[in-house]
Image: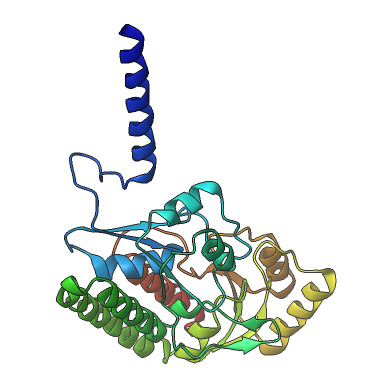
Amino acid sequence: MQIKKKFLGGIFCSLSALLMAVEPQAAGDGQPAPQLRIVTSFYPVYIATLNVAKDIPGVQVVNLTKPFTGCLHDYQLVPDDLKTLANADVFIINGAGMESFLEKAVREIPQLKTIDAGKNIALIKDKNGANPHVWLSVTLAMKQVQNITAGLIERDPAHASLYQHNCDDYVHKLEVLRSRMKAELKQLKSREIVTFHEAFPYFAQEFDFKIVAVVERDPGSEPSAREMVETVQLIKKHKARAIFIEPQYPDKSAHAIAHETGASVCLLDPAVTGPMTENAYLQIMEKNLAALVKTLKD
């Protein structure tokens, strides 16, 4: 009889462990499990989604990648990522090729539902393909917010009015930001800038800047000696006053070029890392505005 009890107890424990592994977990601190679990691919998509889904009961937003990951260039999924995606009701991506791992994710988790924040956005293309850094245009950031909203309303129609209210509120804040940036930046006579990598074409297009050179086409890839010489020549030719580096990456190459040209080295943040708070994108872009005005004003 004692053996039978132990045997049944062992089966119960095994079943309990199995159920815990497959059932959604409670949110913690006595909170019920979310009714809609949204997973975002990386930082700018997370911030946009956080604004659309804020204060909506039963909706949880989590980010797939670590806050310090930055752009998803060559990002490789790890087992914990697949576990997170397997528990997602919807996965929101930047699109435009940023999530190079998406094909693998869908293959591993065929039931994964996605919302493409970059849907129907006209992309800037060059010999390397489409540029995915669309959120650095404030106008296109608004479009991404609207795409996210439409996708969540389709997925969760019971909360349609709340999603739409949040969307309208955040888009208004973005409109105010865009107007202020355009008003201040149009006063700058110097329009030629040098950027650290290919993150800022949409920003330059929106605010009428000309990117005359790029230090590193891909972050972490040191330019060759020939590329360094060409960049120095371009900076001197266009009389660019500053090289804008990014806080997420080493700046050795930029400082070497600045030494040869006399250009200043300043920060321009691509908004791929930062505080995990609703106003983070607005604050980062305000800092970018201040940096440009300080560096390029006469």
- Residue drawn at (24%, 41%) of the image: 28
**Residue 149 visible within the image:** yes
Residue 55 vertical placement versus 7 (above, below): below
Q: Nearer the viewer, residue 153 or 189?
A: 153
Residue 270 vertical placement versus 180 (above, below): above
Residue 98 vertical placement versus 41 (above, below): below
Whether residue 138 sits left or right of residue 277 in the image: it is right
Q: Quadrant of residue 236?
A: bottom right
Q: Position of residue 71 (x, y in %)?
A: 54, 65
The residue lying furthest to the front in this view is 1
**Residue 275 visible within the image:** no
Q: Position of residue 5 (x, y in %)?
A: 30, 14
Whether residue 238 sits left or right of residue 163 in the image: it is right
The residue lying furthest to the right in this view is 226
Q: Position of residue 288 (x, y in %)?
A: 43, 73
Q: Position of residue 126 (x, y in %)?
A: 66, 87
Count of numbered labels shown in the rendering: 0
